[in-house]
Image (cartoon, rainbow, N blue to C red):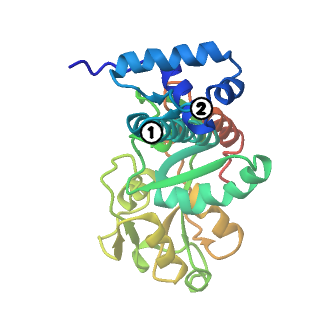
Amino acid sequence: MSRALPPLRLLTAFAAVARTGSIQAAAAELNVTQPAISQAVRQLEDHAGVALLDRARRPARPTDAGQALATAITQGLGQIAEALDALREADQQRDSRVTVACSVGVATYWLMPRLAAFYKAHPDLFVNVVTTPNGVPALGDGIDIAVRYGHGRWSDGLVRHLFDEEVRPVCAPALRARFAGPVPPAAVSLLHVRTPETSWVTWDDYLRLTGLPPVRRGGQTFTNYVQTTQAALDGHGLMLGWRSITGALTAAGHLVDAGLPPLAPRDAFYLVARSKRGGRAVETFADWLVTRSDPA
């Protein structure tokens, strides 16, 4: 038995007859002639193999089979209309939403404080922020943009330079006040971040690259930069302050420069967007972020 469906115009015409109660009213609703409606109904009856209208009545009324089919058509067309509405809404949201991935520290101290200004300039757009445990988030499913720290030579998207970094030891004001000169790393607890990222500057890297004497391992180790920053704010030790993350805290006086040499890492922060052209929100947010990327 063939399961081929009849043309949509036949189904629409018959559903209109059943809904309005007459061929005349259906023709007026669909803005076609009455013979066109009558012909469509007969073609549908031929396709179904049963009578759909009781023509012995005036006006003709759907038979039991016709009423069952009319109900199915109405429900089916309604589901199709709902699906189309959902697709349009999803497309509109896709054009007004952008999802950006970055590390917890970058999200907390660099990206989130900038979003208020973005929303003020673009109140019709919305930014979803996804945090990752590392500094090189992937452009996975649903991720439009990634803010990454590293060499910048990635091939999975369009790479744009955001800003260069500066690393310098910082601490709480009370800890700094204990020393007349620079805070000696060997005299205080060092706060470490545990990360698999080889590009991330560690205390060993910092001391070696700035020519300072090595320090025995010790202090506290954390799994992300936010925890480390909170420990420094609470006065638990000396941390390596990345300008993009602790810059605002030092400007506000919550953390202070430990008086040790600054270090300019060879790597930098980059914005990486999908190579495939994104929607309006993606392009607008990416352009806006690049022009306002100064971490100071």
Q: Report if residue 202 is visible in the image.
A: yes
| 82 sits left or right of 126 in the view | left
- Residue drawn at the location 55% of the way across and 83% of the way down: 175
For the residue marked with disc 2, what is the amino acid?
Answer: Arg
| 138 sits left or right of 37 in the view | left
Task: Give me the C-alpha separation between circle 2 and circle 1.
Answer: 17 Å
**The one of 118 and 15 positioned closer to us in this rendering:** 15
In the displayed image of the protein, which residue is found farthest to the front?
56
Residue 61 x, y percent position in the rendering: 52, 35
Which quadrant: the C terminus?
bottom right
Give the vertical position of 268 relative to 234 (above or below).
above
In the displayed image of the protein, which residue is found farthest to the right?
121
Which quadrant: the N terminus?
top left
| 130 sits left or right of 246 in the view | left
Label 2 or label 1, whichever comes before in sequence order: 2
Give neighbour class at mark 1: few <14, some 14-19, many 20+ (Cα, 10 Å): some
Disc 2, SS? loop
Give the vertical position of 116 relative to 190 (above or below).
above
- Residue drawn at the location 39% of the way across and 63% of the way down: 213
Residue 141 x, y percent position in the rendering: 39, 40
- Residue drawn at the location 75% of the way across and 46% of the way down: 122
For the residue marked with disc 1, what is the amino acid?
Answer: Gln
Disc 1, SS? helix
**The one of 240 and 77 positioned closer to us in this rendering:** 77
Give the vertical position of 84 relative to 265 (above or below).
above
| Count of marks, rendered view | 2
Give neighbour class at mark 2: few <14, some 14-19, many 20+ (Cα, 10 Å): few
For residue 67, which numbered disc appears in the image? 1
Q: Report if residue 242 is visible in the image.
A: no
Q: Quadrant of residue 133?
A: bottom left
Q: Which residue is mark 2?
A: 58
